[in-house]
Amino acid sequence: MSTFLVVLLASVVISTLRLDANGQRVVAANPGLQVVVKERCCSIQTIKRVVGYDRNKRPVYVDERKCRGSCTSAQSVKVITDGGIDNFVGPQPTSPSDLFQSSSFLSGAAVSYYFDKAIPWDRRTAHTIKVPSTCADIARIKLKFCVKASLSFMAINDYVYIWNPQPGVDTALWYSRLSDLFGTWGRNRNACHEATYLPGDANGIFNYVNTYRELHIAMQDDTFFDYTQLTVYYDKTPKTCQAKSTWSTHVPVLLHTGWTKVKVTHDLKCDCDKVQPPPCQRQGYHQVFYANSIFETKVDVGRCVGTCTPFYGFESDEDRARDDTAVQAAVQAIARGSRPSIPIFHPIKNLICQELRTHIEFIKGPNGGQCVEVVDRCDCRGRCYRKDHFEEYVEVIKGDTGIGERRRVFNVGKCAGDCLGKDQVCQPGSTYNAPSFRLRDGTLKVVNIIRYCTCK
């Protein structure tokens, strides 16, 4: 290999796989390629998009604001324990945030900044539990705290608070008298409380933690904490960063062909949406027939994959036929000026992605070959439904020139699915006979074709 070719290949590799200032890989600049400047949680980020080249063959970029970033968390559960589970051996310092300390609950009040410490009495013990920032939403939280009353007889009147110190709000999300929380309360008594909060809880505690990633808790005022423990369960639902609104404009750029305007689209708002599973659809699926022979043939027979969501329609082909008749009657009634009875659709659940239409392909083989059923169309159907099914026959034809043959293929259909009833079976609800014909052995063949299927 010549030196020139080696240098050329090396330059291509270097330009294709180079690192940015943060050590992240940057792909070579090609027209239409988008390069992420920085990766982080789902948010609006600056994307440099190549729109062409200048006269010196250097790429020309435009900046776009795009929704990029992660919507997931590496952890599924995070347990945050502050104060140490040490049965009131300490003390350890508490850490109320600056915002919490400036709230109406703590501002100007006597505050204790320690776990496990009962002296001096008549002080408010406050702490802020910090939740590590992640890209994922929180699915639920569980709060546990253990407290102990001091030797003061006034401890009987103590309260516990969960506070919202946000400007313009500054109020309790929840509070309770300890005697109500534990049944009874008094000097030198200790107990633990545990509660789980889900989305939409009446007090808004979950929403606050999910939004601000912290929880402010306080005790008033002759009772102290041993420890606080917040268990955070992160949402593991697959999600993707999506734009909710956009704005477009045109900006002038100088390319090797001269000045031109290119369209630039900026994302204005981002959010994490659930990754929707693919809908019911046909997927390619190849099978090889008569492998390692002169008749080897590869056929895309297809298969049905994907999910089905509930919709309004018909439970079965029988319902479909009945309602089709009713629709035709309604149309005729409208034409006569009468008020028709319109068929009512009902929600269908438990839908299945099934083969709805197939065809037969003939594959040559050492013994004449075989017919292969190939999936053409997939759709969502109820529990019991009719699907296409083909049968092939050779019809003997007598004419003026003698006896001939022709291939006859019938879509006889077949019933698929199941039924809700314990003793019910998905079977033909109605059939009809196709015109008869003669086979090679002289017998008269009558093909029975299924109209629709039903549960019986």
Image (cartoon, helix red, strand yellow):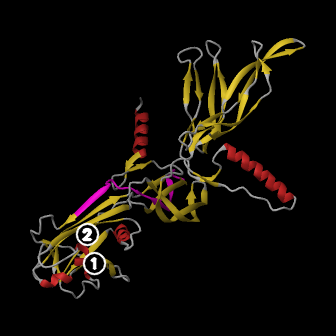
Tell me which residue sits at (38%, 72%) in the image. Answer: 204
Q: How many marks?
A: 2
Tell me which residue sits at (53%, 41%) in the image. Answer: 422
Instruction: Return the residue nearer the eye: 200 or 64.
Output: 200
Q: Give the range drawn in magenta.
A: 54-80
Q: In this view, does 195 lie to the left or right of 47?
A: left
Instruction: Return the residue nearer the eye: 144 or 348.
Output: 348
C-alpha span from label 2 to label 1: 19 Å
Asked whether residue 14 is drawn in magenta, I would say no
In the rendered image, the quadrant that contains the C terminus is top right
Mark closer to the chain start, 2 or 1: 2
Residue under circle 1? Answer: 176
To which quarter of the image does residue 208 belong?
bottom left
Residue type for callout 1? Ser
Percent position (x, y) of residue 25?
Answer: 38, 49
**SS state under label 1:** strand
Instruction: Return the residue nearer the eye: 38 or 242.
Output: 242
Percent position (x, y) of residue 382?
Answer: 60, 45
Residue type for callout 2? Ile
Tell me which residue sits at (59%, 30%) in the image. Answer: 300
Instruction: Return the residue nearer the eye: 116 or 443.
Output: 443
Tell me which residue sits at (9%, 68%) in the image. Answer: 89
Asked whether residue 66 is drawn in magenta, I would say yes
| Residue count near mark 1 (Cα–Cα under 10 Å), binned few <14, some 14–19, many ≥20 | few
Residue under circle 2? Answer: 129
In the rendered image, the quadrant that contains the N terminus is top left
Mark 2 or mark 1, whichever is nearer to me: 1
Q: Is residue 184 left or right of residue 200?
A: left
Q: Which residue lies furthest to the front in this view?
A: 423
| Residue count near mark 2 (Cα–Cα under 10 Å), binned few <14, some 14–19, many ≥20 | many
Q: Residue furthest bottom?
A: 108
